Amino acid sequence: MRIIADLHTRVRTGQASDCVEAQVSAALARGLEAVALFAPDSRTLKPVLESVRAIDPRTPTMRVLSGAACRITSPEGELSAPRAVRRGHDLVLAVATPQLAPAVQRWIPRYRPGLRRALTDAVVAAVYRNDIDLIALPGHLEVDPAELARACRDRGAVLEVCARRPRPSAAFLRQAARLGVRFAVTSGARRPEEVGDFGAAAALLAAAGVSPEQVVNSDRGDLAGWLAERRPFLDYGGWADWTSHGARGREARQRREERHPSDWADWSAQGGEIH
């Protein structure tokens, strides 16, 4: 299985444009077809987004995407980043952090059947209530794979398997895959030299027997198709949310976009560098 895109890299703290360019250069050197960059904190979300939008047109062989990472913060599936903040980005990653467990425990009514059920409800609610693209589950947080699979299938979200963060067990991934969950292998890179290094995550999915077709960013996972479903209309170089644009969105649906994800292969002759 060959991974063609790194859908989760972290931009280091510092001058946003320089840090973004370093990550993008590393992704180009790896021969990736797409890379998603996430800001290190809420204060740098806007500068990183602006830098991503500026550099994307300069990399004709690779899409450069902007990501917003947030935590699931309540039993009702609320996220730490407001919807208005998330809307401007190409990908939204929701993380069920270890802090979610005690937060959910505080709110569990006495008659509820336990923490696993409550955690499952929180994660599933987050998927249904929000436009989430990637879900991250630390290995020690147990959720019902059948409920997770149903939510992912209904909403088109995928489960992240990150090389540099705690991951679900191979047994859980195997069961989730059999129930129809799709996955994204990511590096979680914080430095340029880590971009595109998927080793631990790819090995775990292989051990779980997950097929390449179920990994959206593999060479057989139809990445362009999945991205087009998540963000079907392009705006300023990314997959933007057109729901608030009214007539503008309807007009966009009637015309062919100049730079559609399915055209990535056509750019291969233009050179893998930042122009």
Image (cartoon, helix red, strand yellow):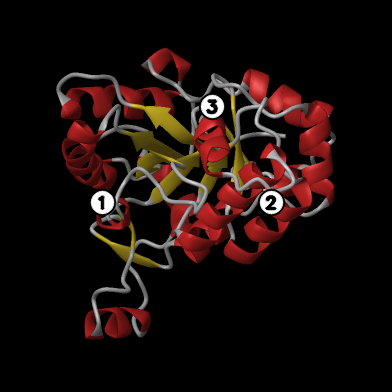
Label 1 environment density (alpha carbons within 10 Å; few <14, some 14–19, many ≥20): few
Instruction: Give residue 143's quadrant in the image.
Output: top right
In the image shown, does 249 or 256 lie closer to the viewer? 249
Tell me where residue 220 appears, x and y as whole percent. 69, 48
Query: Which element is circle 3 on?
Result: loop
Image mark for residue 85: 1
Instruction: Give residue 269's quadrant in the image.
Output: top left
- Residue 263 lies, with reference to residue 11, above or below; the image says below
- Residue 70 lies, with reference to residue 196, above or below; the image says below
Residue for badge 3: 98
What amino acid type is highlighted by mark number 1? Answer: Val
In the image shown, does 12 or 55 lie closer to the viewer? 12
Residue for badge 2: 148
Instruction: Give residue 54's quadrant in the image.
Output: top left
Residue drawn at 31 percent across, 40 percent down: 59
Q: Circles 3 and 1: CB distance less than 8 Å?
A: no
Q: CA distance from mark 3 to mark 2?
A: 18 Å
Tell me where residue 249 appears, x and y as whole percent. 29, 79
